[in-house]
Image: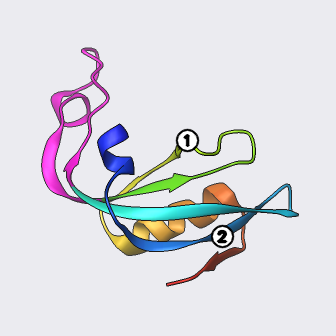
Amino acid sequence: MAMVDELPAVKRGLWLYAGTTPCDVRIVRHDVLFGSGDSEDPPELADDQTMECYYVRYHTPAAAPAWLDGGAGLSLREAVFLAERKLGPVVNWLD
C-alpha cells in the first residue's frame, strides 16, 4: 500500500479522533483494486483487478505519519461513504 500513499489526494479532510483530536483523511484514485491474495477466496476477490477505484487513507494520533487503510470504493461517492462510516458521522471535507 506504500505506493497508494504516494498518490495525490482527490479528496481530503479532517475527522475527530475520540471526538476531539483532528486527524487527516484522504481519498486517492488508483487503477488497481488489490485482491486479498488468499488462495481460498474466489479469483475475483483474491486477485488484483485493473479498474478505477478509490482508497481511503487516514491518520490517528498514534499512527501518524503512517497512513491507515480505510477500505476501497469503486467510486468517489462510495469511498466518501466508507470514510464517513469508518471514521464517524462527521468528516470535515476540505475539497
Q: Position of residue 8 (x, y in %)?
A: 34, 65
Alpha-carbon neighbours of circle 2 within 10 Å: few (<14), some, or many (≥20)?
Answer: some
Say which quadrant the N terminus sits in: top left
Decide which of 54, 65 is in the foreground and name it. 65
- The type of residue carrying mark 1 is Ala
- Residue 49 location, x and y as percent? 15, 43
One can see residue 32 in this view: yes
Residue position marked by numbered label 2 in the rendering: 14
Residue 1: in sight, yes or no?
no
> Compared to 58, does 16 lie above or below?
below
Q: What residue type is labelled 2?
A: Leu
Q: Residue 93 carries which label?
A: none
SS at mark 1 in the image: loop
Segment colored magenta: 31-53
Image mark for residue 66 = 1
Q: In this view, does 19 lie above or below 34?
A: below
User: Relative to 69, is 62 on the left or the right?
Assistant: right
Residue shown at the point (49%, 70%) measured from the top left? 80
- Magenta run includes residue 25: no
Q: Residue lying furthest bottom in this view?
A: 95
Q: Please, which residue is most extreme toward the front here?
A: 65
Residue 19 picture location, percent across and down: 86, 62
Q: Is residue 24 above or below residue 38?
A: below
Q: How far apart are marks 1 and 2 (CA)?
A: 15 Å
Pointer 1 or 2: first along the chain? 2
> Between tags 1 and 2, which lies in front?
1
Element marked by disc 2: strand
Looking at the picture, how far across and down is residue 44, in whole percent? 18, 36
Tell me what residue is drawn at x 18 percent, y 31 percent.
47
